[in-house]
Image (tube, grey):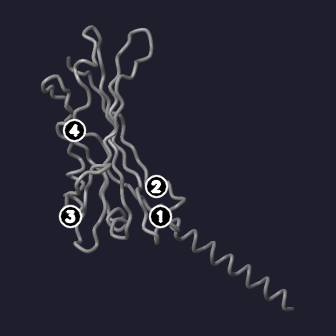
Amino acid sequence: MTSFTANARCTSCARVVALLLLLVAGLARSDALDGTLEVRSAYINVNNGVYELYARIIYPANDAIAAALRDGLTLSFDLDVLVSRERRYWLNSDVVALTLRRELQFHTVSERYLVRDLPAGEPQSYATLDEALDALGKVEAWPIIIRSQLADDARYRISLRAGVRRGRLADALRAILFWSNDWHRESEWYSWALPQ
């Protein structure tokens, strides 16, 4: 009779744990990065032989993101840039591949959102999540290639893709979100011919 009671307790404990895990997984999967993620516009300005990128990106903003940031989650924002040489009868050849990395976190003491260029940029502080996401979505005068890297008789294409992913986790969130893949999204590629 004692082993039957112990087995019944183990079974009921296992059911409770499984139910809690399903509940937590459901919360973690509730459209974490739901919303618009797209490169809205982009262009190149040539300044003394340096091709500088200007772009506007729209990043998702919702209550799940705000709550996770307040709970200690850090989000990483990547802007992938690819400059490729167009070839008529063969695959395009990549000339330059760069990634601009930025990070967003919530500072609980000051109750402000901090945006930092990685690896060692100075943090910029914003009062609201919308202001921080707007700042993250602006890329101005980012040098991506120099004129001497381009051949005069070739055509080139530039492509951009924005991405958001989960960065560092607070200790309390590691157990909940370690298996979740909902904290990673990428936009479609935005491409155009590179001016010569």
- Quadrant for the C terminus in the image: top left
Percent of width and height locating residue 25: 53, 65
Name the residue: 22% across, 67% down: 112
Q: Amino acid at mark 3?
A: Thr
Label 3, label 1: how far apart the Cα atoms are: 23 Å
Helix, strand or loop at label 2? It is loop
Q: Quadrant of residue 94?
A: top left
Which residue bears the numbered disc 4? Answer: 55
Residue 179 position, x and y percent, is 54, 59
Residue 128's tag is: 3
Local crowd size for mark 4, using a 10 Å CA cut-off: few (<14), some (14–19), many (≥20): some
Q: Secondary structure at mark 1?
A: helix
Q: Earlier in the sequence, mark 2 or mark 4?
A: 4
Label annotation for residue 28: 1
**Kind of residue at badge 1:** Ala
Q: Any mark on residue 182, and which?
A: 2
